[in-house]
Image: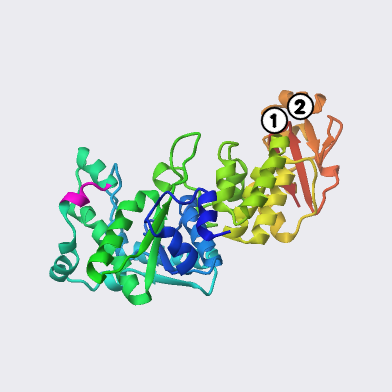
């Protein structure tokens, strides 16, 4: 299958220049995608771009991953607010963190990481206005979506933000001249900025380059995009969103979202995804599609070992069987589940259920035990049992109250 056809089948081409099919399928040029260091981690919304870049690399294209050390000092205009300017130390910290995530996720010899401060930081104002600014009209700039929205609002728009499209266009021009980069990709909200670069290269170099954007990931239940500004960020950093929490977030994807996420965020073949969806439709309660999505995406972001650990821990906490754990899996289980040391147990099961927050009072604890609501590894417990005398597996005891409340006791 041609690369352009695969991207279209996955719903990954939103806007595109007219020459996009020829460029993708025949020329296979150097391409670039960028992100500004507005935080010390990228998030699930950014991952869509990185996975798309990974697809292009796997198809034989060479990638430039740009971190906006220069543009990050300005900030891309948002439709509803001005971005907070970051200090130099924060910017440098964020640049290093994002560069590490680039290397980990789009791991290939065909990838080069660049910082646009290398060239943007060298411009002086007069030269920039003469060489770059002269190629843009205010008439066109105010038509760009984010700028147009801000001009309608009471917030207004600073000249700093107004100049942002010129900076991004300069990036494309510079990468074209340095590396013969002829393709830029990005989210659909970047189309105006991307086209500015395409036009600038045509004016300055007399060359036709290409671009396409992919639709932003939109949570169909809330109508909001996946991103930090919406307060629903799922971070790619293990320190900000643990591999288990990352896995769970994808595992909990709605039935309305799962097909789109499988197509756009995994590297599975489209035909294989369709087979998985057919099986899932026969028994949606078993959540095969969501489990596949969670494992495949966690594997890309955090590695296969972390994905398998998250998968096993999830099965222990929400499934019916306890499976033998490795060291990393045990550590993840204790970290992610409500966990208590066996030393905290008294031997009195009623008192212990209160200690473990499985009951709020002695009366409630007795009711749960009499109703067989408390289980250890699936075995029903009664008032005559003692948690300290139960058999631990791998020094772990998993207690459940009903279907949703689970605690882990460890030695």
Label 1–label 2 contact, CB within 8 A: yes
Residue 193: % across, % down: 30, 55
Residue at x-position 64% and y-position 43%: 290
Residue at x-position 62% and y-position 44%: 251
- Residue 271, can we see it? yes
Q: Kindly identify which numbered label has been placed on residue 128.
A: none
Q: Secondary structure at mark 2?
A: helix
For the N terminus, the quadrant is bottom right
Q: Quadrant of residue 337?
A: top right
What residue did someone put label 1 on?
359
Q: Say whether residue 142 is magenta.
A: yes
Q: Say whether residue 270 is magenta.
A: no
Residue at x-position 43% and y-position 39%: 224
Q: Residues within 10 Å of mark 2 (few under 14, many from 20)?
A: many
Q: Secondary structure at mark 1?
A: loop
In front: 385, or 283?
Answer: 283
The answer to whether residue 321 is left or right of residue 246 is right
The answer to whether residue 392 is left or right of residue 136 is right
In front: 149, or 370?
Answer: 149
Task: Give how far apart the Cα atoms at labels 1 and 2 are.
Answer: 8 Å
Of labels 1 and 2, earlier in sequence is 1
Residue 144: % across, % down: 26, 48
Q: Residues within 10 Å of mark 1 (few under 14, many from 20)?
A: some
Residue 23: % across, % down: 43, 64
Residue 37: % across, % down: 38, 60
Q: Quadrant of residue 165?
A: bottom left
What residue did someone put label 2 on?
368
In front: 376, or 168?
Answer: 168
- Residue 283, can we see it? no
* Colour scheme shown: rainbow
In front: 59, or 389?
Answer: 59
Read off the magenta span: 139-144
């Amino acid at each position: 299958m041609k690369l352009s056809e695969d991207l279209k089948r996955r719903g990954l081409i939103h806007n595109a220049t007219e020459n996009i099919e020829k460029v993708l399928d025949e020329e296979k040029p150097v391409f670039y995608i960028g992100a500004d260091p507005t935080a010390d981690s990228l998030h699930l919304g950014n991952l869509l771009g990185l996975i798309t870049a990974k697809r292009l690399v796997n198809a034989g294209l060479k990638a430039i991953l740009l971190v906006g050390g220069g543009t990050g000092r300005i900030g891309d205009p948002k439709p509803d607010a001005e971005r907070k300017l970051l200090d130099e130390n924060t910017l440098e910290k964020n640049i290093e963190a994002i560069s590490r995530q680039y290397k980990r996720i789009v791991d290939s010899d065909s990838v080069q990481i660049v910082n646009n401060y290398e060239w943007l930081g060298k411009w002086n104002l007069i030269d920039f206005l003469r060489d770059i600014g002269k190629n843009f009209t205010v008439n066109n700039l105010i038509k760009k979506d984010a700028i147009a929205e801000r001009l309608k609002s009471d917030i207004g728009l600073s000249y700093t933000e107004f100049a942002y499209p010129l900076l991004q266009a300069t990036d494309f021009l510079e990468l074209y001249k340095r590396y013969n980069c002829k393709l830029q990709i990005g989210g659909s909200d970047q189309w105006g900025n991307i086209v500015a670069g395409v036009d600038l290269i045509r004016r300055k170099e007399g060359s036709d380059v290409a671009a396409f954007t992919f639709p932003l990931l939109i949570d169909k239940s809330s109508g909001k995009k996946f991103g930090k500004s919406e307060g629903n960020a799922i971070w790619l950093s293990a320190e900000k969103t643990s591999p288990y929490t990352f896995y769970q977030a994808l595992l909990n994807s709605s039935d309305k979202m799962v097909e789109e996420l499988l197509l756009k965020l995994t590297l599975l073949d489209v035909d294989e995804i369709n087979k998985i969806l057919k099986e899932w439709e026969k028994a949606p309660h078993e959540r095969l599609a969501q489990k596949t999505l969670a494992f495949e995406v966690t594997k890309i972001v955090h590695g296969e070992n972390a994905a398998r650990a998250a998968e096993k821990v999830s099965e222990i906490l929400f499934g019916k069987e306890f499976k033998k754990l490795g060291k990393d899996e045990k550590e993840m289980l204790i970290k992610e589940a409500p966990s208590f040391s066996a030393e905290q147990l008294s031997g009195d099961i009623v008192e212990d259920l209160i200690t473990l927050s499985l009951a709020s009072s002695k009366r409630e604890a007795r009711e749960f035990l009499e109703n067989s609501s408390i289980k250890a590894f699936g075995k029903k417990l009664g008032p005559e049992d003692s948690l300290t005398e139960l058999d631990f597996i791998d020094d772990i005891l998993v207690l459940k109250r009903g279907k949703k409340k689970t605690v882990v006791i460890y030695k």
